[in-house]
Amino acid sequence: MINRQSAVIAPEPTEGFVETSEIKDITERALSYLKAGFPVHLSGPTGTGKTTLATHLGYQLNRPVMLLFGDDEFATSDLVGGSFGYRKRKVIDNFIHSVLKTEEDVAQRWLVNRLTTAVKEGFTLIYDEFNRSRPEANNALLSVLEEGILTLPTAAEEEGYIKAHPDFRAIFTSNPEEYAGVHKTQDALLDRMVTLHLDYFDEDTE
């Protein structure tokens, strides 16, 4: 079962987006990395247009976009999926009228979350302010970004892992670590991304 939570959006032009020469240069650099299969990380202070640029890049890739927003309450299951509740199946066999045979099967209900959906379907993942999530929650990203493999919990209704769709791409945004509510990102994760540092634009761009 997929929990899309209305997070999948069709790529479309960003309303009011103005592409100056500076923004065009950043966009072209980011797209070249993304098309080559590298995850892109847009880092910079609030108000530098990271989310808007990430959405614009998603439009340029022309694939469905999966939106994900960093949250301190996130666990790995909020990214990958987990067992939520139970599914019960009951079969009653009364083929022979004098014999009533009943079978019941109870199994945990597996719910797929956004990262798994994006990896499997080849969507563009935009993980906005990903460093607001705790580092241990983001550990699931390590194998995806390095080997193109998403490891699943043993309870998943899969083989234990998913190989990333060839069209899967990932765009991350983050705020500086000194901001309130922001966690330090593990070096192993940063090493798997191409980080583009954004600052406040010049007067013409503004």
Image: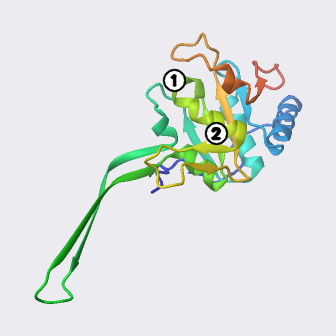
- Image coords of residue 64 (percent x, y): 65, 53
Residue 89 lies, with reference to residue 72, above or below; the image says below
Q: Residue at x 51, y 29 (%)?
A: 137
**In x, y percent, where is residue 152?**
53, 44
Question: Front-most of 151 and 50?
Answer: 151
Q: Quadrant of residue 196?
A: top right
Q: Is residue 143 left or right of residue 24?
A: left
Total labels drawn: 2
Where residue 50 sits, quadrant-wise, is top right
Whether residue 138 is visible, yes or no, is yes
Q: Residues within 10 Å of mark 1 (few under 14, many from 20)?
A: many
Give the vertical position of 120 relative to 183 (above or below): below
Q: Quadrant of the C terminus?
A: top right
**Kind of residue sitting beneath label 1:** Arg
Q: Which mark is residue 134?
A: 1
Query: Does residue 16 appear in the picture of this structure?
Result: no
Q: Earlier in the sequence, mark 2 or mark 1?
A: 2
Residue at left 50%, top 51%? 4
Residue wearing tag 2: 126
**What separation in Å lies between label 2 and label 1 (alpha carbons)?**
17 Å
Q: Relative to 143, is 90 above or below?
A: below
Percent position of residue 18, x then y: 78, 37
The residue located at (13%, 84%) in the rendering is 99
Q: Is residue 170 left or right of residue 37?
A: left
Element under disc 2: strand
Disc 1 secondary structure class: loop
Looking at the rendered image, the quarter that the N terminus falls into is bottom left
Image position of 46 (left or right of 72): right
Q: Residue at x 75, y 41 (%)?
A: 57
Q: Nearer the viewer, mark 2 or mark 1?
A: 1
